[in-house]
Image (cartoon, rainbow, N blue to C red):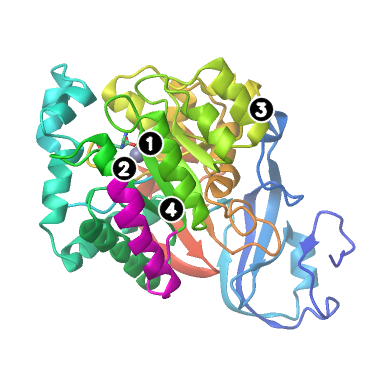
């Protein structure tokens, strides 16, 4: 680290750190607040660390041509140190706030056939499993996704990712899981890969062939198909360089995959190099949290029904809890015990759970819900939607905070305090002025309205 005179200016390790006359990609200057989230290279935050985020007043950010953050610091220090530099682009953020790009740690964004009709059924009292067992839910989406060509699925995915981007998400986890057989699972994973290659939003790809038991199969048969047909074929595609997959997922739930099948599938995924990141303890206490901790899972999602033992195991194993406030809200479930997890030192993150059951593309809405329904504070919610969500995706070395050396992903909001991003319930399109990835403006809204 090359220290400058001001201790609050952080400068990336540069070959010639005295010479600030280089050509650089972007200067965001004079922001009212720059929320770094953390500033000591933390890979995640817990407890007090989530309450006390690193926030600079009257600050600027510099991003280099490599797309990485070069410096973050007080506006006057940055100005004097980079006086000689040539920037491709300068954004004057006077009166605005800069935050890290948001990270959405759980989505199911590749599908055809919406389920708007099921919303009425659920409002009338049908439970998630009643809809599922009647052939709706995941099964309905599987039928439509199997019948849809990859190009149509890709166009649908791109539209959804674009909506997420406009709400500030710059890194998102995307699952397969509406195929439940090899060809459609591969089709979905390839569609996710195609989006990764053609869009600027960052993507972490998850194989979720165990999202439900396909119609006509028993759980045992579905497990065998995953272990002996789907996973080997996926591994072959990965090894041949035709596919990138990052994580393995199972819906560990009563009536779906039991603990033993879940263990076998997750372990097999881990054995081929995938990170374990799965659905657990959502509708029934399954001891999923204990299993995940034992297997070294990076993350477990939902956890509405997690037990005290499960919480303790996750805290010990540093397995991240991905909480999904939209699910409990839409399905009128008991909320996950966020406060108990936070107090126990669990690494808590957030996801939108975007899927045909929970049609939400907006992490600001998710943070708002997390504060109101899960009783998280605004700093906790922001840490959960940035550095901790990046940890859940094994990306916290490059994403989740505004620190030198990390990817230059940020959003600029038209508000004098960063908390407006959470305080406002919807209408974020009127708040988000710029979304920036690797120092490039990927979304600009010049029609933002004043507060
Ligand atoms: N619980 C399982 N999977 C999804 C829902 C998927 C669907 O209903 O299509 C979830 O995380 O909420
Ligand atoms: Zn899910």
| Image depth: mark 3 or mark 2 in front | 2
Give residue 345's mark: 3
Report if residue 363 is visible in the image.
no
Question: How far, Cα to Cα, is label 3 from label 2?
Answer: 34 Å
Q: Earlier in the sequence, mark 1 or mark 4?
A: 4
| Image depth: mark 3 or mark 4 in front | 3
The residue carrying mark 4 is 172
Q: What element carries label 3?
A: loop
Report if residue 141 is visible in the image.
yes
Label 4: few (<14), some (14–19) or many (≥20) C-alpha neighbours in 10 Å: many
Contact (CB < 8 A) between labels 2 and 1? yes
Place of residue 95 in the rendered image (x, y in percent of width and height, measured from the top left): 57, 51
Q: Above or below — where is 104 with respect to 374?
A: below
Q: What element carries label 4?
A: strand
Question: How far, Cα to Cα, is label 3 from label 4?
Answer: 24 Å
Q: What is the quadrant of residue 68 in the picture?
A: bottom right
At x 36% / y 56%, what residue is drawn? 231
At x 59% / y 30%, what residue is drawn? 314
Question: How far, Cα to Cα, is label 4 from label 2?
Answer: 27 Å
| Image depth: mark 4 or mark 2 in front | 2
At x 26% / y 35%, what residue is drawn? 219
Question: How far, Cα to Cα, is label 1 from label 4?
Answer: 27 Å
Label 2: few (<14), some (14–19) or many (≥20) C-alpha neighbours in 10 Å: many
Give residue 223's mark: 2
Asked if residue 226 lies in the magenta stretch, the reply is: yes
């Amino acid at each position: 680290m090359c220290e400058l005179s001001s201790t609050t200016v952080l400068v990336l390790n540069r070959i010639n750190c005295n010479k600030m006359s280089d050509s650089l990609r972007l200067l965001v200057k004079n922001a009212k607040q720059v929320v770094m989230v953390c500033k000591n290279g933390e890979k995640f935050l817990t407890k007090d660390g989530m309450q006390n985020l690193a926030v600079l007043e009257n600050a600027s950010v510099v991003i280099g041509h490599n797309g990485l953050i070069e410096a973050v610091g007080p506006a006057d220090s940055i100005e004097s140190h980079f006086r000689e530099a040539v920037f491709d682009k300068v954004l004057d953020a006077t009166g605005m706030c800069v935050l890290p790009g948001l990270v959405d740690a759980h989505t199911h964004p590749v599908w055809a056939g919406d389920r708007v009709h099921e919303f009425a059924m659920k409002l009338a009292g049908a439970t998630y499993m009643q809809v599922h067992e009647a052939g709706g839910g995941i099964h309905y989406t599987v039928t439509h996704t199997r019948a849809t060509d990859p190009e149509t699925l890709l166009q649908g995915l791109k539209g959804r990712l674009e909506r997420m981007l406009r709400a500030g998400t710059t890194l998102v986890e995307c699952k397969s899981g509406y195929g439940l057989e090899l060809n459609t699972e591969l089709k979905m994973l390839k569609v996710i890969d195609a989006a990764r290659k053609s869009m600027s939003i960052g993507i972490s790809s998850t194989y979720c062939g165990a999202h439900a038991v396909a119609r006509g199969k028993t759980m045992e048969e579905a497990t065998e198909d995953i272990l002996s047909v789907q996973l080997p074929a996926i591994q072959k595609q990965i090894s041949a360089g035709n596919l990138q997959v990052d994580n393995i997922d199972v819906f560990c739930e009563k009536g779906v995959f039991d603990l033993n099948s879940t263990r076998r599938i997750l372990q097999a995924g881990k054995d081929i190099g995938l990170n374990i990141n799965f659905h657990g303890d959502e509708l029934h206490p399954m001891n999923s949290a204990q299993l995940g901790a034992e297997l070294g899972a990076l993350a477990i999602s939902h956890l509405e029904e997690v037990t005290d033992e499960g919480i303790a195991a996750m805290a010990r194993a540093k397995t991240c809890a991905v909480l999904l406030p939209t699910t409990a809200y839409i399905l009128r479930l008991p909320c996950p015990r966020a406060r108990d997890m936070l107090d126990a030192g669990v690494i808590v993150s957030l996801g939108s759970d975007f899927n045909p059951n929970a049609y939400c593309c907006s992490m600001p809405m998710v943070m708002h819900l997390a504060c109101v329904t899960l009783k998280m504070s605004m700093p906790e919610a922001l840490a959960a939607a940035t550095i901790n969500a990046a940890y859940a995706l094994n990306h916290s070395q490059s994403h989740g905070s505004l620190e030198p050396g990390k990817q230059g992903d940020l959003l600029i909001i038209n508000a004098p305090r960063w908390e407006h991003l959470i305080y406002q319930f919807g209408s974020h399109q009127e708040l988000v002025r710029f979304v920036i990835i690797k120092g490039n403006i990927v979304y600009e809204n010049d029609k933002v309205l004043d507060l």
